[in-house]
Image (cartoon, rainbow, N blue to C red):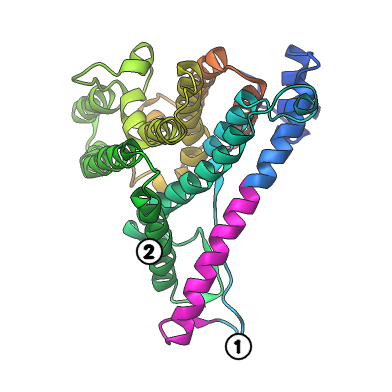
Amino acid sequence: MQDVAVTPWSRIPPIARAFLRYVSRSPHPSVIPVLVLRSEVDDDIDAMTGRMFREVELELDSALAAGEVETVDVGDAVRFDYDTRLVLPALLTLGRLCVLANDVPIVRHVRDVDEELARESRTTTYNIVQALVDGDMRDAINDEEYEDFVTNARPKSRVAERAQARLAENVQRWFEKAETPAAVREHYEHAVDLSEGHQDDDEAFRDLLDRYHATEGTDRADVAEEIRESYKFAEHDEPLGLFDADSSLPYFLTQYLRVGILYEDMLNMYEADLDIDLGDDFKRAIVLMVIAAQVGLDDTDDYPEDRRTQLTPVTAELNLADDRETGVENLREVVVDYLDRAEACSPDHLTSMAIEFIRQQSLDRLAALPTSDQ
């Protein structure tokens, strides 16, 4: 098992460790322009989300004037923000498109830049970021989870509904534009349908976990085997195309339907809107990275709340293992396997550095899991 004791290396922030590890393995001058590109696309995404939330604040100002919401401090204008960690794949896709357009710092001064692709890529990214945040907000509202809605307006439930409705309206307006290919909407609706279908399965997965905790001895062993067969190593009735080679990975099917499909169709939306091929390697790297991040970061963070209520790869492994140390090691192997595969097919430095950052963050989070449930 990997040594998880505190060391001078582990005290270095994950983003710095990721950079040092990556550069030590890829000491090529071409890394430098990509580092600057990362900063540029970060700024682009920040500007996009800032613009998006300003529109939401205008919507909430109208609700305030109509008496539908109120601010915590009398007379204050409505402020609104939302956790946008989920847009990292859109950031990386924008970076990938900049590379394809030769719109990369330093390089753009010595090569012909496809100005039209560079411009349209940012427009498409803005629309896709709205679609991603709209979908995430909808899921949060359905689950009555409002902690990611950062606002001085109340009630939060009403604020969340108005914010999500505004984004949904903007997304539909994009779909209805004459210049937007029909395939963009088709990929979006495909992702929503499969994701909602997977959410319908959540109740069955919760029931499995409830039965596991309610039984002992042979009965518990039988339920544990059910979890392995229907959750950890679930099999799909049809080939998974781009991901056939990955379908035997632990938890692949359940996590692909939970989060992977959303980002595969996000990438398909990019390709349809821009009439461009992002490449199978890039698409596969993004989806595998997303699944690893879901397990190593989100599910690991949520373990204290999920451990008896939600079946996730983290609650499954920590329940099924003989002891906590073995469970954590099993989880580490799962996350690292996904990230190794993502890195092996990553076509560019920007994506590879993001994969390494998620690796370092995940190892930190897994090492910090409590040693017991007591």
Instruction: Check disc 1 and report its element: helix, strand or loop.
Output: loop
Mark 2 vs mark 1: in front? 2
Dominant secondary structure of the magenta stretch?
helix
Where residue 85 sits, quadrant-wise, is: top right
Please tell me how crowded label 1 is: few (under 14), some (14-19), or many (20+) other residues with Cα within 10 Å.
Answer: few
Q: Position of residue 321 (x, y in %)?
A: 40, 25
Q: Quadrant of the N terminus?
A: top right
> Which amino acid lies under the numbered mark 2 shown in the image of this protein?
Ala
Q: What's the CA distance linking mark 2 and mark 1?
A: 25 Å
Give the side of residue 82 with respect to residue 12, left or right: left
70 falls in the magenta region: yes
Q: Is residue 157 magenta?
A: no
Q: Is residue 369 visible?
A: no
* Structural crowding at the residue carrying mark 2, measured as other residues with C-alpha within 10 Å and reported as few (<14), some (14–19) or many (≥20): some
Which residue is more in the foreground, 176 or 144? Answer: 176
User: Compared with residue 289, is residue 145 higher up or lower down, i.e. above or below?
Assistant: below
Magenta stretch: give its range.
45-71
Q: Residue at x 53, y 47 (%)?
A: 126
Tell which of 364 and 129 is nearer to you: 129
First along the sequence among labels 2 and 1: 1
Q: Position of residue 277 (x, y in %)?
A: 47, 22
Inspect the image, locate mark 1, and give the three-letter code of the amino acid beneath it.
Gly
- Horizontal and vertical percent position of residue 263: 42, 34
**Residue at x 32%, y 35% (from the top left corner):** 183
Which quadrant of the structure image shows residue 140? bottom left
**Picture quadrant of residue 185:** top left
Identify the secondary structure beneath mark 2: helix
Judged left or right of residue 299, residue 199 is: left
Q: Label for residue 75?
A: 1
Which residue position holds label 2? 165
